[in-house]
Image (tube, grey):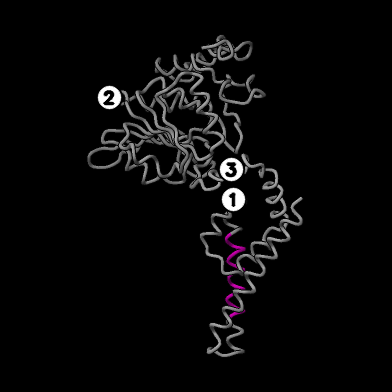
Amino acid sequence: MNSANKGIGMTSQRTRNRLVERLREGGITDNRVLEVLRQIPRHMFMDEAMASRAYEDTALPIGHGQTISQPFMVARMTEVLLQGPTVPSKVLEIGTGSGYQAAVLANLVDQLYSVERISQLLNQARQRLRELNLHNVQLRLGDGYQGWEKHAPFDAIIVTAAPEVVPRELIQQIAIGGRMVIPVGKPLQQRLLLLTREPDGISEQVLDWVSFVPLVKGFFFELISPLLHDYGYWDKYLAAVSKFKEWGAWAVFLAGFSPIPYKIFTISAGALQLSLFPFVIASLLGRGARFFLVSALMVWGGSKMENQLRQSVDMIGWAMVVIIGVLYFILRG
């Protein structure tokens, strides 16, 4: 480990030793876990501005709305994962994040597979793991809800973000006799669960009340965001999103009035960083207005004109979308 990784002052080995002693006093008893935490430079897994706080026992922001987990929680979840009759050989991690939890596990298991939905975090984690010479980790950009079926079954699965319910796909990827540690529930109502797959089903044990960032489905936007960065469109994208949010529900209402398929709506909600619920409500109102306009015109013009009326309304809807697009580019900045 080079001198930069060893740290100085608030990132020194002495500071790491004090953190490990606090974890031991807090109830962590597995010496394998404590020794790995003593050796891994946590300050490597966050921005330099946050490095002085790296060995506080608290979660810290790493960007993109994500956090690096509290050291006690990393130790606790790792300890539970190792408490089976045998040490798991092949482990799946959902939510690579900064890469810190992956670094801990890579020192304790033979092979680690880790899935992350945010490409920037994944690339940073890959670089950090290389610097630490941890080569038994395979990383993948993808939807954590889907796991990594190609390499299933896994002896153990660890999930570092909280779904509201346990994803069925993850349960199916646990080997018989294997276990999964996962936070589950809505914000302020999350429990840390230990699930064990028995030959006749799944056993569940509640470990603690916890607080994690939510596990988010899908990764469409995370696929296109690197392209926006690479081709110099990121600032323009942010300006366009800002302008769209200023228009808010009106723009969504007009788009809903058009014959755009609903799949496009849900993809657009992610790309425009909008809350899905008000986005869908506004689009449904637009759809409703379109339906009532068609119905009113049919009453006025008769059912024989239904196809022509629908085509006319569709043309109006598409015209609205084109107008929105043109104004978007004129006003974006």
Q: Determine which of the numbered discs, if any, sits on residue 71 in the image.
A: none
Residue 290 counted in the magenta span:
yes
Q: Earlier in the sequence, mark 3 or mark 1?
A: 3
View extreme (left): residue: 199
The residue that mark 3 highlights is 227
Q: Is residue 62 left or right of residue 242?
A: left
Taking depth in this image into account, of 190 and 167 the one nearest to the observer is 167
Residue 274 in picture, x, y percent from top left: 62, 52
Q: Earlier in the sequence, mark 2 or mark 1?
A: 2
- Give the quadrant of residue 330: bottom right
Labels 3 & 2 near each other (Cβ < 8 A) = no
Q: Determine which of the numbered discs, if any, sits on residue 85 in the image.
A: 2
Residue 100 in picture, x, y percent from top left: 50, 25
Magenta span main SS: helix
Taking depth in this image into account, of 180 and 187 the one nearest to the observer is 180
Which is in the foreground here, disc 2 or disc 1?
1
Please, what is the three-letter code of the amino acid marked with disc 1? Ala
Residue 327 counted in the magenta span:
no
Q: Residues within 10 Å of mark 1 (few under 14, many from 20)?
A: some
The residue that mark 1 highlights is 271
Residue 216 in picture, x, y percent from top left: 50, 45
